[in-house]
Image (cartoon, rainbow, N blue to C red):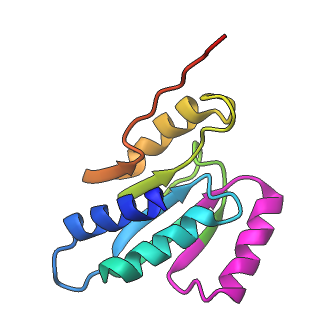
């Protein structure tokens, strides 16, 4: 719910009012919860989107492709690639990720997101904008 709210706010903030679709890249898309959140946010904000769902796990890509067919993910392009090596066809307005895992870097979050930042347009928004990992005894 928090991701959906953040994406809807970013869409509303970045929309030019001309009806043009904003580009959203969901990196580390997994089995699609953030793709669904993006599509719901687009509907709530009344801002059209073009979504790239980037995922390197081949099993998750199979699920994403099935979701695209079954859930009418019309504006979604499924990309089977490692985000660190993928050459995006265009820049994105919003970069969405959730590469935290059970420990802040166990999904290569710093390495992956550092490489994915190059997708962002100069005035683009990254969601989350930051995070902090804590270790407690």
**Residue found 57% across the figure and 74% down from its top:** 77
**Residue found 49% across the figure and 62% down from its top:** 1
- Please say if 117 is above or below 49: above
Q: Residue furthest left?
A: 17
**Total labels drawn:** 0
Tell me, yes or no, if residue 71 can be seen here. Answer: yes
Instruction: Judge from the rendering whether residue 4 lies leftward or rightward of residue 79; answer left or right.
Output: left
Instruction: Judge from the rendering whether residue 52 lies leftward or rightward of residue 94; answer left or right.
Output: right
Q: Residue furthest top?
A: 137
Q: Is 72 one of the magenta-colored residues?
A: yes
Quadrant in the rendering for residue 134: top right
- Please say if 104 is above or below 63: above
Quadrant in the rendering for residue 105: top right
Residue 92 in percent (x, y) is at 37, 60
Residue 66 in percent (x, y) is at 76, 79
**Residue found 57% across the figure and 42% down from its top:** 84
Q: Is 29 one of the magenta-colored residues?
A: no
**Quadrant containing the C terminus in the rendered view:** top right
Residue 90 in percent (x, y) is at 39, 63
Q: Residue furthest right?
A: 59
Residue 41 in percent (x, y) is at 41, 73
- Please say if 52 is above or below 130: below
Tell me, yes or no, if residue 92 can be seen here. Answer: no
Q: Magenta span covers which residues?
A: 54-77
**Residue found 24% across the figure and 70% down from its top:** 12
């Amino acid at each position: 719910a928090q991701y959906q709210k953040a994406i809807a706010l970013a869409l509303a903030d970045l929309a030019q009012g001309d009806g043009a679709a904003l580009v959203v890249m969901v990196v580390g898309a997994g089995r699609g919860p953030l793709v669904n959140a993006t599509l719901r946010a687009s509907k709530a904000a009344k801002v059209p989107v073009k979504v790239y769902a980037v995922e390197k796990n081949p099993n998750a890509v199979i699920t994403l492709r099935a979701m695209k067919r079954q859930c009418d993910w019309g504006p979604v392009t499924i990309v089977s690639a490692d985000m660190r090596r993928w050459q995006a066809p265009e820049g994105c307005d919003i970069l969405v990720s959730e590469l935290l895992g059970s420990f802040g870097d166990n999904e290569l979050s710093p390495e992956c997101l550092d490489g994915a930042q190059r997708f962002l347009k100069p005035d683009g928004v990254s969601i989350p904008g930051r995070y902090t990992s804590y270790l407690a005894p």
